[in-house]
Amino acid sequence: MIEVENLYKKFGKNEVLLGLNLSIDKGGIFAVLGPNGSGKTTLIKSVLGMVVPNSGTISVGGTTIKKNWKYRKEIDYLPQIANFPGNLKVKELIRMIKDLRQMPSNEEVLISRFGLESFLDKKLSTLSGGTKQKVNIVLAFMFECPLLILDEPTTGLDPASLIHLKTLIKQEKAKGKTILITSHIMQFVAEIADEIVYLLEGKIYFKGSIEELKIKTDQSDLEHAIAAIANTSTNV
Amino acid sequence: MLFLNNDVSKAVITLMNIIIVLVPLIGTIFGVMYFYNSKEFTELLLAQPIKRSSIFSGQYLGVAGSLALSLVLGLGIPFVAYGIFRSNAIFDFTLLLVTGAFLTLIFTALSFNIALTNENKIKGFGYAVLLWLFMAVIYDGLFLMSLIVFKEYPLDSFSLTATMFNPIDLSRTLILLKLDISALLGYTGAVFKQFFGTNQGLTVSLIMLILWTVLPVWRLVVISKKKDF
Amino acid sequence: MFYLFTFLFFSNLLRGNTITVCANCEVKTISEGVNIAVEFDTLLIKKGTYKEYNILIDKPLTIKGDSYPIVDGEEKGEIIRIVSDNVTIDGLFIINVGTSYTSDYAAIRVVKSENFTIKNVVLEKLFFGIYLEKSNNGRVYHNKIIGDAIDEYNSGNGIQLWYSKNVVVEKNIVQHVRDGIYLEFSDNITIKDNTSTDNLRYGLHFMFSNDDVYTNNLFENNGAGVAVMFSKRIKMVNNTFRKNWGTAAFGMLLKEINDAEIVGNTFEENTIGVNIEGSNRIVYEKNNFIKNGWAIKVLGACYANTFSRNNFLHNSFDISYNSKLNDNVFNQNYWSAYTGYDLDKNGIGDVPYRPVKLFSYIVNKTPETIVLLRSLFMDIIDFSEKVSPVFTPDNLLDANPLMKKAL
């Protein structure tokens, strides 16, 4: 589904991605993990075309993304910070995104699942962080795209909504979609991820299932396994 | 009916002062403000299947267009109501509105350029205000000083060229061509005479204004294509 | 009663006979008519074309054209020369005066004669138009002079007065000549209701002529406007000076003029409204200065001039001085650029107005800076100069600026 070859990116003097190679197959949930500043978001944004790499190629669904924008029709994206134009109402925002994408959508189901009905006529600037995140989730999940990219989807969600989110992700997986997630909540990752992609110093340090990671690091749970990776890398 | 008597010219002069000073300021500040405020929204749009250039040119046209329109309508309607069509200042007045609209387009484009190249909001704001201050005041000060220092040399080509490189001066010149032509013709230089005495001045100034609009917008599109978010 | 009858009888006799001149008449040319006429006869010139020049009128005659007969000089030289008193020329259409670099050929020249009248004459394709030379007590009335002057060196003046006194020049139209009306060493001349436009150099030009009056004339689009030089006690009333544009163009140039009165004139859209050089004791009252580049430009020493109840409307610069000295008085004028207030509502602004801007001083020094006119920077430095004058005469101000236009 996604092929990344030799990806380099630096911001000023700060080299973030150093020849990253990644291949993600169709179907399944992939968790992109790594310490802060390891390039998770940069990788995701490169795939989305928001960051222009210095060199290397990325292709999504078989087409290279350079100077191309139509491939984004195949991607649903949930950004890390959900800041919307404050003067729009929730309803208007949803309508606008629908208008932009011109695809069939199922926002009603999602709205009722997250209990957003009463907020539809409110301005976005008046919403709390958690509610904004819910709107964010609705926007990301309301279309049926084969690739779903979620950047810190759990931020600010209450436990009930978190459960909704998990079921939602699992449903989408069941439809055969490819889902890319970044998160710092290991419990969440352990629960839903099929495979882990661990980024370190601009490269893929580890790619495989949670079990493989546990074996490799000789730890019994994911959180410690991840911590162990971080430790070994700093020792190296 | 106040404007039907002699004081249309006074009104036009007052308006000119406002337009060449305030319009660029509003365009710059509003442009930078809008750009920074809508950053997240821009990111939201970037993840959607839309061409980058259309996102930014759309934002630019939205801001610049609405500012220009509010200027033209805001000034135009009261004057039309006061019967400008029946007064002979109509041409001066139209020119004033056209330059005002151009200044809005130019300075909004410049401020978008600044905002695009500066991630830091405070820095961006600073540069924007500096840009305005430079174009509106400092440039003319330097210009004047260089004219006085080099007064032994033929300066008319230099001064006209220097005028062309500042959109505020350029618009001022356009309006001067209408309001103060009698004073402008008092100077001996042949280049001046050619420029102010014929239609050349009007044509060249308008072309330069268009260039001033097109270049920043073009740069905007180019930068936005390479920019990371 | 007897004396009166006798007088009438003789005056009738003096009127003389009428001689008709036309192509089929007994008398076929004007010169021939003048030759056979006796004093106080009338020559009636019928419609037609008369190819004549050097017509010498040496006796008191009235030459009257019927429906504008054409006198064509074929560019051979002067056309009519009057050397006798009491001559009247009326209703001729004179064309093709010869051009010369050595003598000033005129359509009509009056030499050392008195009591002449030249009226209803139309002149075209001329060198000099009407030339009065040492001739007094005459009248130049309702003539139309349309030249085609292109260069100053080979063109002449419309109406020229040289050492002539007590002449009235009235309701003439002069266009496209070198100087519309030119006066040299001519005193007590009245010039009124004339229109002098599109002339190469000056609409009206005074040199060494005293005690003259000109009223209600219109001077428009002349190369350099109107020049009044080296003359005393001139009265200029209700004239209009418009659209004199160019490097050295002005509505009116005053050079070495003393004791003049300039009242009720309108100076509109000139590069310089009034240019004053070395002129003293002049009274400027109730004039309108509208949309000029410089309303008044003062060069050199000008003392004891007073400006009151004038309107200065929308000029790029109201007044420009090239020195720091000021001995002229400005009082109770209306300045459209005045931004003061009138708290006691007496119609007079409570703060004085300073008509000389620092910028005009800078423009005098470095003319190219004119392109910075009306820029914010200039407004700022003008303001600071206004607060504490350094470069401009600090006593130059109108202490009582009017709040409303003076009528």
Image (cartoon, coloured by chain):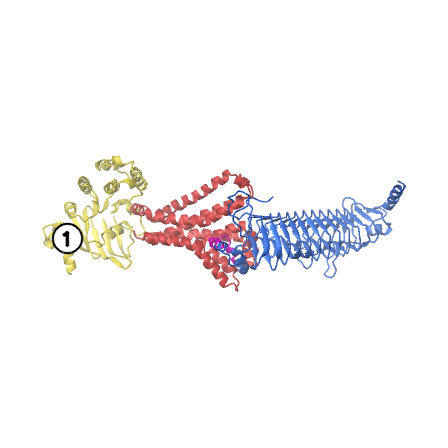
Chain colours: A yellow, B red, C blue
Whether C379 is among the magenta residues is yes
Magenta stretch in the rendered image: C369-383
For this rendering, which residue is in front, A66 or C10?
Answer: C10
Toward the bottom, the furthest residue is: B152
For this rendering, which residue is in front, B65 or C266?
Answer: C266
Across and down, in percent, residue B132 comes to 41, 53
Q: Main secondary structure of the magenta part?
A: helix
Name the residue type under label 1: Ile
Q: How many marks?
A: 1
Q: Is residue B44 left or right of residue A180?
A: right
Q: Is residue B108 visible?
A: no
Mark 1, Cα crowd under 10 Å, few <14 / some 14-19 / many 20+, is: some
Across and down, in percent, residue A46 comes to 27, 52
Across and down, in percent, residue C385 comes to 49, 56
Q: Is residue B162 left or right of residue A55?
A: right
Across and down, in percent, residue C138 comes to 77, 50
Q: Please report, as a chain letter, where disc 1 is located.
A: A
What residue would you read off at disc 1?
A: A226
Q: In what quadrant of the picture does the N terminus of chain C appear?
A: top right
Toward the front, the furthest residue is: C344
Q: Is residue A217 above or below residue A76?
A: below
Q: Is residue C342 visible?
A: yes
Q: In what quadrant of the picture does the C terminus of chain C appear?
A: top right
Secondary structure under badge 1?
helix
For this rendering, which residue is in front, B49 or B194?
Answer: B194
Whether C100 is among the magenta residues is no
